[in-house]
Amino acid sequence: MSGRPSLSAEGRVWLITGPDGKLMDDIDTDMIYHNAHLAVTEVSEMGRYAFGNLEGWRDFPEKVRPGDIVIAGANFGCGSSRQHAVDCFRALGVGALVVESAGAIYFRNAVNSAFPLVIAPGIGESGIKQGDSVSIDFETGLIKDLDRPVVFRARPFSAVQREIYLAGSLFAVRPS
């Protein structure tokens, strides 16, 4: 066994939806991880605050399980450069985030932390349902619903994202 992470994930889906049942857009870093908890510096302690400022999702940390896949709408993680908003999902063991689009700084923080963030424009119309099991191939971008005949194509990891992910973090990447 190489000890290197797999370039795929499989898990139960959490569709982050609003009262209208559609994927929520514009979930900012304060909704993901409220600034009241920024004094928490131990990553392992950050999970309990995930979505703590997102109406209807405050109980997410009690329900999510390691390996689960979070799917959300456009502009996920907009706002500040708060690393806590990535680390809270790492602390919970979330297997991957799949979003229609992400804030630029949030995306970079996730990549640098080797946290799998997949960009999937149109994922809200894919037919994937709450609680379904999906597999994601980070190299091809292929997302398969394991509970129904749904296949969706997201953007695959870039070469840089792949290298950092396999290394475990930006700081673990060996210079060429």
Image: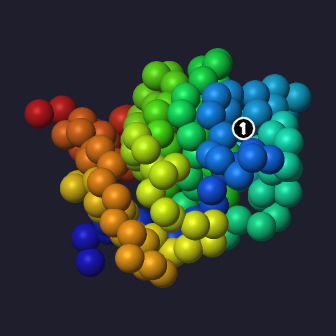
- Tell me which amino acid carries mark 1: Ile
Position of residue 153 relative to residue 27, above or below, is: below
Residue at the disc numbered 1: 32
Q: Is residue 71 left or right of residue 62?
A: left
Residue 156 % position (x, y):
26, 47
Task: Residue at 81%, 32% (x, y): give it.
Answer: 34
Q: Is residue 68 visible?
A: no
Q: Quadrant of the N terminus?
A: bottom left
Q: Is residue 93 left or right of residue 46?
A: left
Position of residue 75 relative to residue 17, above or below, is: above
Task: Residue at 23%, 55% (x, y): give it.
Answer: 139
Q: Is residue 62 visible?
A: yes
Task: Residue at 77%, 67% (x, y): give it.
Answer: 63
Position of residue 50 relative to residue 151, above or below, is: above
Q: Quadrant of the C terminus?
A: top left
Residue 13 % position (x, y):
58, 65
